[in-house]
């Protein structure tokens, strides 16, 4: 009787209304509280291995507090896209509250560093530039007012967590900001200012400066050092000298670490976990620091995260450990777990990292879907078991993105969001934000302001955005997409399955790509049995498996099939 009722329901769906709704009532996202929005996805376990991470430049995403755009007299005219443009922490929070990330299927947000930047500007060959990008630290212990305040950061984390979204802080241990007329160099016992990195062996990559005028922290040193006089004077003027010194004393007493440069910075970075409960770090310039420093950072980050959870039991999302993903520039999944310096190989996964950014996908994406999906599924379920990679196609400092002209936005979405591993959506991937800007030089081209106006007014952008939303939400709701095992079910039309099993939890989905318009038959034999009711999340249609196939009739070239509730 139950099967008969289901069959009748399917017939009604197919012939009474092609685009019928799921049986569960549809809710207007605008009427939901953040807790209700979180509850909608609480049945799906979160796994970092298949996370859908949104990466944005804090200064270039959304301006929530225009009245605070100018600080420290940063008024000099700059080269194109090399000054502060107003984006801030409050602006990110606004978009979380608006449901932008939820509707895009995002379950973690990574934004560029928000610690206090150098106050002055530099001109190192690309024109006058301020530290709008966040990687030019002046003081690790406080937030730059151009980005906001600690209260703003606290509000962002709480709002993100209320919406089931994790927060990754971008952190820098390798270098300070450049030296300017008003930003003095740190003492010699803290930094080196030469030689420049040659990148031809381990030492010439770690014990050197990345570029001219970027002082390199002596992260390999265990020699105790005193705090810079300029930093002490700054803290005194701001009325927090005693507090900062007391906290440092407690840290070094608890850990027993020598007061070497890296341990001061490790303390300052992990303070943001202790204070706000951030869920992970994206670590900058990993291969330019001796690897033991990252293991030490992870140890203190784990301690901070567990301490925060004990103090804030009502704010804990789940039992996942602290997440650390590293930028080892030019590392790729094809090379296995280790990075080869020429004279030395280093396994960063064995030195604190849960994941590394994968520089291979932007090139692999020129191959067929099946070749990429099969390769990544195999590697992640063998050599990388228990670890993962973070895939991307565009980024803030990669001048050779997969689709620089934004001419393949649908294929980009398919390749990024359906490839096994975690995905990094770079802000504007989903809205075709231009990656080439008139007058901009170098990486400034990649860092234009988010094109919100296009999303509001350009139909093509709106259609592309909708595609990214559908795939993103399917990825978020199904760990099988990013963390499961891949299997091709049919070559033409192209259909594949993904399966994820963790204890009692089992997730099975089928995806079809490059499908013909109109009536189409998708093979699911051996994966979903006859009589199984499936829901296509792309066309919002229910179908039943018959003779090992499902039949859809629409003009979409994509199908996202899941068991119907």
Image (spheres, helix red, strand yellow):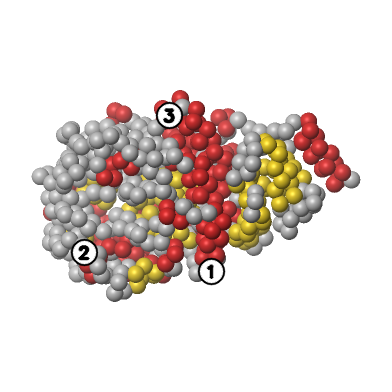
Marks 1 and 2, Cα distance to the nearest angstrom? Answer: 34 Å
Q: Earlier in the sequence, mark 1 or mark 2?
A: 2
What residue lies at 71% left-to-right and 51% top-to-bottom? 523
The residue carrying pointer 2 sits among few (fewer than 14), some (14 to 19) or many (20 or more) residues within 10 Å by Cα, namely some
Q: Is residue 376 left or right of residue 203?
A: right
* Disc 2 target residue: 198
Residue 390 visible (yes or no)? no
Q: Secondary structure at mark 1?
A: loop
Residue nearest the observer in this picture, 116 or 77: 77
Percent position of residue 84, x then y: 26, 36
**Disc assigned to residue 283:** none
Q: Earlier in the sequence, mark 1 or mark 3?
A: 1
Percent position of residue 526, x then y: 73, 58
Q: Are marks 1 and 3 in contact (CB under 8 Å)?
A: no
Q: Is residue 162 left or right of residue 549?
A: left
What residue lies at 25% left-to-right and 56% top-to-bottom? 246
Outermost residue to the left: 181
Give the label, 1 or 2, closer to the camera: 2
Q: Secondary structure at mark 2?
A: loop
Query: Would you identify the image quadrant in which residue 227 lies?
Result: bottom left
Position of the C terminus, as image quadrant, is top right
* Disc 3 target residue: 454
Outermost residue to the right: 1
Query: Would you identify the image quadrant in which residue 34 lies?
Result: top right
What residue lies at 30% left-to-right and 36% top-to-bottom? 437
Q: Secondary structure at mark 3?
A: helix
Outermost residue to the top: 457
Marks 2 and 3, Cα distance to the nearest angstrom? Answer: 42 Å
Position of the N terminus, as image quadrant, is top right
* Disc 1 target residue: 382
Q: Earlier in the sequence, mark 2 or mark 3?
A: 2
The relative height of residue 499 versus residue 416 in the rendered view (above or below) is below
């Amino acid at each position: 009787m139950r099967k008969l009722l289901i069959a009748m329901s399917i017939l009604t769906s197919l012939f009474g209304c092609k685009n019928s709704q799921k049986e569960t009532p549809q809710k207007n996202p605008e009427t939901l509280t953040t807790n209700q929005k979180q509850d909608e996805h609480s049945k799906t376990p979160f796994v970092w291995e298949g996370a859908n991470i949104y990466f944005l430049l804090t200064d270039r995403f959304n301006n929530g507090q225009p009245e605070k755009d100018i600080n420290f007299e940063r008024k000099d005219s700059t080269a194109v896209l090399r000054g502060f443009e107003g984006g801030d922490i409050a602006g990110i929070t606004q978009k979380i509250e608006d449901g932008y990330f939820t509707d895009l299927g995002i379950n973690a947000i990574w934004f560029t560093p928000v610690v206090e930047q150098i106050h002055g500007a530099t001109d190192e060959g690309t024109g006058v530039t301020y530290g709008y990008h966040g990687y030019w630290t002046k003081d690790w212990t406080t937030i730059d007012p151009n980005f906001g305040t600690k209260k703003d950061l606290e509000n962002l984390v709480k709002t993100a967590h209320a919406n089931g979204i994790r927060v990754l802080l971008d952190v820098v241990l390798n270098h300070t900001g450049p030296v300017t007329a008003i930003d003095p160099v740190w003492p010699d016992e803290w930094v080196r200012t030469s030689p420049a990195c040659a990148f031809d062996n381990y030492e010439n990559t770690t014990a050197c400066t990345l570029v001219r005028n970027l002082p390199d922290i002596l992260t390999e040193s265990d020699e105790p050092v005193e705090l810079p006089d300029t930093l002490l004077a700054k803290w005194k003027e701001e009325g927090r000298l005693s507090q900062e010194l007391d906290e440092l004393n407690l840290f070094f007493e608890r850990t027993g670490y020598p007061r070497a440069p890296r341990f001061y910075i490790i303390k300052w970075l992990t303070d943001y976990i202790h204070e706000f409960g951030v869920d992970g770090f994206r670590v900058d310039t990993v291969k330019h620091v001796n690897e033991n420093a990252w293991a030490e950072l992870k140890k203190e980050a784990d301690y901070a995260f567990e301490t925060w959870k004990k103090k804030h039991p009502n704010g804990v999302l789940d039992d996942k450990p602290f997440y650390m993903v590293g930028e080892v520039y030019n590392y790729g999944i094809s090379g296995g777990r280790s990075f080869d310096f020429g004279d030395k190989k280093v396994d960063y996964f064995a030195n604190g990292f849960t994941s590394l950014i994968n520089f291979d996908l932007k090139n692999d994406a020129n191959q067929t879907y099946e070749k990429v999906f099969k390769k990544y599924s195999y590697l992640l379920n063998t050599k990388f078991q228990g670890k993962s990679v973070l895939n991307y196609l565009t980024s803030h400092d990669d001048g050779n993105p997969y689709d620089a002209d934004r001419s393949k936005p649908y294929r980009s979405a398919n390749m990024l969001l359906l490839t096994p591993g975690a995905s990094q959506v770079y802000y504007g991937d989903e809205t075709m934000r231009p990656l080439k800007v008139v007058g901009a030089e170098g990486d400034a081209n990649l860092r234009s302001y988010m094109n919100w106006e296009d999303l509001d007014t350009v139909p093509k952008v709106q259609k592309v955005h909708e595609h990214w939303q559908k795939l993103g939400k399917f990825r978020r709701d199904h760990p099988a997409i990013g963390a499961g095992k891949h299997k091709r079910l049919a070559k033409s039309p192209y259909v594949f399955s993904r399966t994820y099993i963790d204890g009692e939890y089992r997730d099975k989905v089928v995806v079809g790509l490059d499908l013909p318009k109109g009536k189409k038959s998708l093979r699911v034999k051996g994966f979903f049995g006859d009589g199984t009711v499936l829901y296509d999340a792309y066309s919002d249609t229910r179908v039943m498996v018959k003779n090992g196939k499902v039949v859809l009739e629409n003009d979409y070239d994509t199908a996202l099939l899941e068991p119907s509730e």
